[in-house]
């Protein structure tokens, strides 16, 4: 086939693989979280991240923040690590809920955050002797810290975190999970931020140092000197899923301005918390 037809086929195939949203904020959500996080790193953490990032990332964590979504077909084992499902309740219980669809325990996003945090702690010993590929550990941790803050990544098992709830986003057919991964952010960018992800990220970043400044130390802190505390992040997410994502939505609902404008502040808050906590976790790991 001609080069042109080949490019079209490649374009269509990439679309097919990039589309479905059962695995996390869309690229813009992850980009925003990693951009916020990298701007808040200590000197030691910034140096470690720079050393661990692959060369093609050119020291830009945001540019590889969706890497874990791109490898999920190749690394099939990693698919359950992007989310948590609860049995239809608005709270998270690690022993009850952290398992994959076959019931294998410890296969969920909270476990993955602990796992990759523990792997990255070996960096300080002697990274050349580490048993792990710490580049991959960094990219997984950065991505999963985002996923766990997306409320519907800690949703109900019965509707697969909203994936099985068909609704209309304004005039377009969509599922509820995708609305939270992508559509709220995309609509906000189009309407308020010149369709520019960096303007969107900057507006959130500005608020971290102004409107939310008093709350940030609390976001950063984990109890009893833990390096990271994914159970807290997951508990907040399922609560937000109940209070905001699922609330007032039924199969066939049409979601438009009322829903968009009241939920956008929640999306911004979760992106801010994801970025702040990724930085705090990396700062503790590499301190
Ligand atoms: C922990 O990381 C290793 C290495 O990437 C991986 O094989 C394993 O599945 C991970 N487990 C969890 C729960 O993240
Ligand atoms: C570590 O993982 C990255 C990303 O998958 C890969 O490009 C690199 O070659 C790996 N490094 C080693 C030493 O295997
Ligand atoms: C900034 O934070 C304040 C205080 O929480 C909040 O009322 C406001 O909506 C936030 N602005 C943005 C852009 O998220
Ligand atoms: Zn994901």
Image (spheres, grey):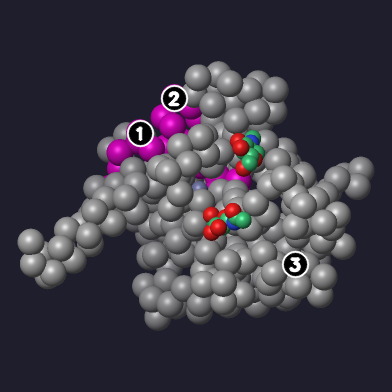
Q: Residue at x 65, y 77 (%)?
A: 206
Which residue is more in the foreground, 195 or 249?
A: 195
Q: How far across and how far down the image is residue 266, in percent?
A: 57, 56
| Location of mark 3 (residue) | 48
The C terminus lies in quadrant: bottom right
Estimate the x, y position of residue 142 in percent, counting from the top left. 62, 56
Helix, strand or loop at label 1? It is loop
Mark 3 residue element: helix
- Start-end of magenta stretch: 148-168
Give above or below for 156 relative to 79. above
Q: Are marks 3 and 1 in contact (CB under 8 Å)?
A: no
Image point 56% across, 38% down: which residue? Answer: 81
* Crowding at mark 3 (Cα within 10 Å: few <14, some 14-19, many 20+): many
Is 240 situated left or right of 19 in this image? right
Q: CA distance from mark 3 to mark 1?
A: 40 Å
Would the CB of label 2 be found within 8 Å of ligand 4? Answer: no
Q: Which mark is residue 158?
A: 2
| Residue 92 image position (x, y, % from top left) | 66, 31
Q: Could you classify mark 1 by the number of other residues whose Cα lies within 10 Å: few (under 14), some (14-19), or many (20 or more)? A: some
**What's the residue at 65%, 51% (across, down)?**
133
Q: Nearer the viewer, mark 2 or mark 3?
A: 3
**How far, Cα to Cα, is label 1 from label 2?**
8 Å
- Picture quadrant of ligand 2: bottom right
Q: Which residue is mark 1?
A: 164
Residue 163 sits inside the magenta stretch: yes
Q: Position of residue 75 (x, y in %)?
A: 48, 41
């Amino acid at each position: 086939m001609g080069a042109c037809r080949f490019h079209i086929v490649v374009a269509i195939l990439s679309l097919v693989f990039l589309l479905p949203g059962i695995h996390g904020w869309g690229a813009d959500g992850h980009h925003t979280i990693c951009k916020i996080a990298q701007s808040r790193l200590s000197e030691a953490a910034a140096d470690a991240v720079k050393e661990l990032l692959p060369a093609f990332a050119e020291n830009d964590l945001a540019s590889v923040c969706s890497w874990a979504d791109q490898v999920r077909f190749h690394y099939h084992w990693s698919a359950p690590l992007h989310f948590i499902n609860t049995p239809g309740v608005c709270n998270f219980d690690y022993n009850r809920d952290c398992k994959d669809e076959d019931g294998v325990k410890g296969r969920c996003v909270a476990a993955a955050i602990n796992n990759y945090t523990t792997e990255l702690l070996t960096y300080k010993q002697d990274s050349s002797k580490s048993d792990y590929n710490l580049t991959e550990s960094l990219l997984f941790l950065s991505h999963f810290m985002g996923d766990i803050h997306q409320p519907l990544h800690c949703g109900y098992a019965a509707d697969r975190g909203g994936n099985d709830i068909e609704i209309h986003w304004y005039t377009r057919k969509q599922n509820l999970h995708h609305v939270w991964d992508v559509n709220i952010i995309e609509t906000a960018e189009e309407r308020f931020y010149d369709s520019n992800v960096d303007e969107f990220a900057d507006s959130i970043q500005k608020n971290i140092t102004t409107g939310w400044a008093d709350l940030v130390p609390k976001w950063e802190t984990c109890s009893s000197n833990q390096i990271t505390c994914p159970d807290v992040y997951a508990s907040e997410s399922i609560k937000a899923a109940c209070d905001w994502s699922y609330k007032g939505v039924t199969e066939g609902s049409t979601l438009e301005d009322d829903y968009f404008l009241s939920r956008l502040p929640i999306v911004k808050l979760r992106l801010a918390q994801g970025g702040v906590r990724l930085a705090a976790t990396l700062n503790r790991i590499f301190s």
